[in-house]
Amino acid sequence: ETRQMASKVLIKLFMDIYRMGDANSSLEILSIFFEMVSKDVVDARVHAFNLLFNMSVHANLYEEGAFHSSMLETPRPGSETSNIWGIQEDLYDKLLEVLLFILHREEKDERVWTAAVNCFLYFVSNKGFIDKKRVNKLDPRLIPSFLSIPLLSDEVQRKLLRMLVNFLYPHGKTSSLSLDVLVLDRIGGIRFVIREYVST
């Protein structure tokens, strides 16, 4: 109960910082997330992704309020209404930074990775569809870590594998597809592909 109350206060503080458009404070928010996922306590590392998720939910509420407000009046540059439209993208960028951070720290706990992949899928999903532009911002090295989570649902596994295929065979200006060897090397090479093929 104490953590829940503290989380509500922290989310309110973070959202107020976003609404004020303070870039330096936004960097401090990112450093707080880095600190959380550096903790020895697993629950603290998991909670970092829960906070990012809840901040995004609150951002949606702010955006809905801004939309209804804009129906009544024209937003002024620099006003609260005009400042909040980029919150979701900034939160997603922070999520990507935190994901890379735990990748480089070689996070082992499956609970942390499960919270991470759930948060990621929330951010890249829009009305049942995957936002390809957001997915393309992901470092492909994270996909193998996502796929290593035990007991992934078939649906999640299929989504991740499709993302991986799109990274390996990016759509270029021509209709033909060619393997991106650099991406293949980054995700673990042909051994990783064979291992996933055998396990699915």
Image: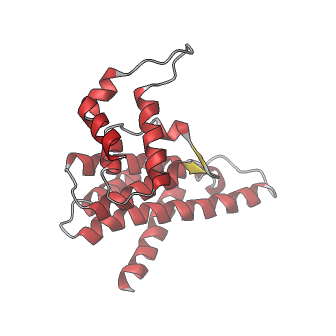
Q: Which is more toward the observer, 183 or 87? A: 183
x, y (%) of residue 69?
75, 60
Q: Nearer the viewer, residue 158 or 78?
A: 158
Q: Position of residue 121 (x, y in %)?
A: 48, 52
Q: Quadrant of residue 64?
A: bottom right
- Quadrant where the N terminus sits is bottom left
User: Whole-percent x and y of residue 97?
Assistant: 34, 46
Instruction: Answer left or right for 72 relative to 40.
Output: right
Relative to residue 62, is residue 24 drawn left or right?
Answer: left
Spot occupied by residue 84 in the image (x, y as percentages of width and height) = 58, 53
Residue drawn at x 35%, y 54% is: 30
- Foreground residue among 50 and 174: 174
Q: Which residue is drawn at 75% across and 60% down?
A: 68
The residue at the point 32 percent across, 58 percent down is 150
Q: In the image, is residue 95 above or below residue 60? A: above
- Residue 22 in sight: no
User: Residue at position x 54%, y 37% from top?
Assistant: 132
> Which residue is farthest bottom?
1
Furthest residue to the front? 198
How many labels were placed on the picture? 0
